Amino acid sequence: MAKQYSTLIIDDERLARVRLRKLLANFSEVFTIVGEAKNGLEAEEFIIDLQPDIIFLDIEMPKQTGFELLQKLEKVPMVVFCTAFEEYSLKAFDTNSIDYLVKPVKLERLQQTVDKILNLKHTLSSEKMLKVIDEIDIQKKERKKMTTIAVKKSDKIVLVKLNAVSHFKATDKYVTLYTDKGEELIEYSLTALEENLPANFLRVHRSIIVNTDCIKEFQKYFNNRYIIVLKNKNKATITTGRSYKEVLKNWIEI
């Protein structure tokens, strides 16, 4: 009988946590889920208290990234990263001790992770883990940022230039991009977009990324929020999230 591994899911997107929990339920003989954390700070407390064998870890999260979390831990559990890096840049993860799942996670790919875990001969030391993190950070900085985004339309794919996009908004399972010509559903998560979009795109809400080149003005709002008015033909407005106050303040340098 396979060993049961106590498992912690760490991701700032609720739907991603729900999806992963359902996928892991297919391997209940391997994983015992002991908890979920929605950011790095919460995860740090859970790891200290629960001492999980394995963590399924998102990288880009508010308050504390997955990398920052690992750098603070005295004892690093087995790590399976779940995020949106391009697979071709992941040579640093070519090891029996950790794995990397690209969102949206597929059951067939998770099966490979399970096989790898069950065949482990040794664990990864904290020192080696930090080396992996450094290598991934370098790869991330060297990656070329997106200039267009693919939109599927029936039997064809249309490339939309990013400078025409005013903002992206997530609702339920879908993400929509907005331009002066209208709106389109796309097959990206906000986390994937945040990883790959150029610097002029800023996440201002849990469910919204805005093109700062399209901002006309902003107004102070209550509860540490702002109202952003866009330059697009509809003069659309966006209300920022409370937890993104510092992000916006740093951008506008107030």
Image (spheres, rainbow, N blue to C red):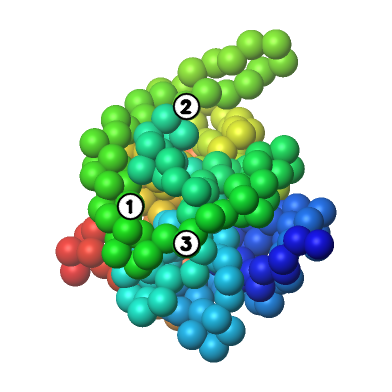
- Give the image location of residue 221, x and y in percent: 42, 73
The residue tagged 3 is 123
Q: Secondary structure at mark 2?
A: strand
* Residue 59 seen in the figure: yes
Q: Which residue is mark 2?
A: 149
**Disc number lying in front (1 or 2):** 1
Q: CA distance from mark 2 to mark 3?
A: 39 Å
Q: Amino acid at mark 3?
A: Thr
Quadrant location, the N terminus: bottom right
- Residue found at x 32% / y 47%: 136
Q: Is residue 122 left or right of residue 23?
A: left
Q: Quadrant of residue 117?
A: bottom right
Q: Amino acid at mark 2?
A: Ile
- Relative depth, front residue between 155 and 231: 155
Cα separation, mark 3 vs mark 1, equals 14 Å
Q: Residue at x 47, y 22 (%)?
A: 160
Pair 3/1: label in front: 3
Is 175 or 13 nearer to us in this picture? Answer: 13
Q: For mark 3, does the 10 Å Cα neighbourhood hold few (<14), some (14 to 19), or many (20 or more) residues?
A: some
Would you identify the image quadrant in which residue 104 lies? top right
Task: Residue type at mark 1: give it.
Answer: Val
Per the image, the residue denoted by label 1 is: 132
Q: Secondary structure at mark 3?
A: loop
